[in-house]
């Protein structure tokens, strides 16, 4: 019980008129990444086919059906019922957020209103969902794109994007989600911001900031399962390197850090394992790499950059290779 109570509570409200039952498993698998679905309701006119939402699907996923007759031709009574329930749940203060499962832009104002009440709003729908609704949510998940990814993994088939890189990724998602050039430009901006503060940009930060900036960002939308592979394949102006066990992200044009560290260590070894003045190291680096700047790696001074190399010890102006214990 403690584990459930620690999780954020969500009300999952599904528009059966607008969303197919084939996404049922994906909807609840996704919500588990954010919290617990304490309310599970689906709205529709069950006297019609209902997009495949049959009794067995509802029972399997513990979804409560809400019958809504179409009182007047051409009017969507389902939308109104779902909005009324959402506001009732909101004022009950029993949840931390809402998951609105629909591709209907009529729910845009509801998403905005829920956010005004400090609710975390997750949207789920197909790629046909208007931009207004995707932007109104804190996070929007394209069910048809992630569902395709799940099907590819289960069938053992590689997606076109993972085979061919950025061109295939563009073709795979089309204009439904944030474009790859927009993502790359945003990452470059993050890196430059961090460089101005003397910070290294790590992969984890990239993922968090992309999610904050683009409500629909998810590497699965482009045919990938890992952010590191997505960046390597689709963002040619970026490169990734490891610091200890963590990935960091830099701009192409900077020197490869691993290679640079090897050259510095070799130079110091050739000088007896110790160099008495930092300027000698600086001159050696600049002799081979005139464009070198420690700020490119997140450091304001050369001494700070050298201290980040585990095999080196820096004391004052002296640089030496640490003795192995």
Image: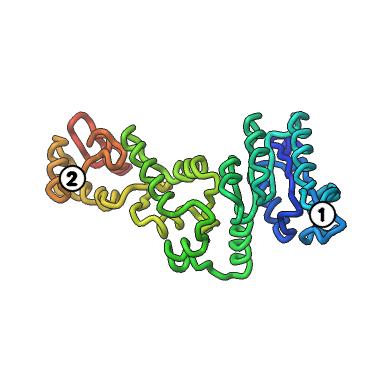
Q: Which residue is mark 1?
A: 58
Tell me where residue 139 sits by quadrant. Answer: top right
Element type at marker 2? Answer: helix
- What residue appears at the point 18 percent right and 34 percent down from the top-left corner? 318
| Mark 1 or 2, closer to the camera | 1
Secondary element under disc 1, as helix, strand or loop, is: helix
Relative to residue 4, is residue 126 drawn left or right? left
Left or right of 167: which side holds 134? right
User: Horizontally, is 251 left or right of 25 in the view?
Assistant: left
Q: Please name whichever residue, 302 or 109, is drawn nearer the observer in this view of the structure.
A: 109
State whether residue 71 appears in this view: yes
The quadrant of the rendering that contains the C terminus is: top left
Residue 201 in the image: state x and y as whole percent: 38, 41
Q: Residue at x 66, y 33 (%)?
A: 113
Residue 107 point in image, percent of width and height: 67, 43
Residue that label 2 marks: 268
Does any portion of residue 323 appear in the rendered image? no
* Mark 2 Cα-neighbour bin, 10 Å: few <14, some 14–19, many ≥20: some
Whichever of labels 1 and 2 marks the residue nearer the N terminus, that label is 1
Q: Residue at x 75, y 54 (%)?
A: 17
Residue density around tag 1, few if under 14, some if 14–19, many if 20 or more, within 10 Å: some
| The image quarter in which residue 187 lies | top left
Visual colour scheme: rainbow
Residue in the picture at 36% in, 45% down: 188
Label 1, label 2: how far apart the Cα atoms are: 69 Å
Asked if the residue under mark 2 is in contact with the one under mark 1, i.e. CB atoms within 8 Å, the reply is no
Q: Is residue 115 above or below residue 31?
A: above
């Amino acid at each position: 019980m403690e584990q459930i109570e620690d999780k954020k509570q969500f009300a999952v409200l599904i528009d059966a008129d607008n969303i197919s039952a084939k996404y049922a498993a994906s909807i609840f698998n996704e919500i588990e990444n954010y919290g617990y679905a304490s309310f599970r309701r689906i709205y529709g006119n069950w006297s019609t086919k209902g997009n495949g939402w049959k009794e067995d699907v509802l029972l399997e996923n513990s979804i409560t059906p809400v019958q809504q007759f179409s009182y007047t031709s051409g009017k969507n009574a389902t939308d109104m019922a779902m909005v009324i329930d959402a506001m009732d749940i909101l004022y009950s203060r029993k949840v931390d957020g809402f998951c609105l499962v629909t591709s209907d832009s009529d729910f845009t104002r509801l998403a905005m209103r829920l956010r005004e009440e400090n609710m975390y709003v997750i949207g789920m729908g197909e790629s046909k969902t208007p931009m207004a609704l995707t932007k109104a949510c804190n996070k929007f998940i394209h069910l048809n794109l992630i569902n395709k990814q799940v099907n590819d993994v289960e069938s053992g088939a590689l997606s076109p994007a993972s085979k061919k890189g950025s061109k295939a990724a563009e073709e795979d998602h089309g204009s439904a989600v944030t474009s790859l050039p927009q993502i790359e430009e945003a990452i470059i901006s993050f890196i430059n911001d961090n460089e101005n503060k003397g910070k290294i940009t790590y992969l984890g930060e990239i993922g968090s900031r992309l999610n904050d900036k683009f409500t629909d960002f998810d590497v699965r939308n482009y045919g990938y399962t890992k952010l590191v592979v997505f960046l390597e394949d689709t963002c040619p102006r970026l490169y990734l390197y490891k610091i200890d066990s963590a990935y960091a992200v830099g701009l192409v044009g900077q020197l490869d850090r691993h290679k640079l560290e090897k050259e510095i260590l070799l130079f110091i070894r050739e000088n007896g394992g110790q160099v008495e003045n930092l300027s000698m190291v600086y001159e050696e680096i600049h002799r081979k790499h005139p464009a070198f700047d420690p700020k490119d790696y997140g450091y304001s001074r050369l001494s700070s950059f050298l201290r980040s190399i585990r095999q080196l010890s820096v004391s004052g102006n002296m640089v030496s290779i640490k003795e192995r214990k």
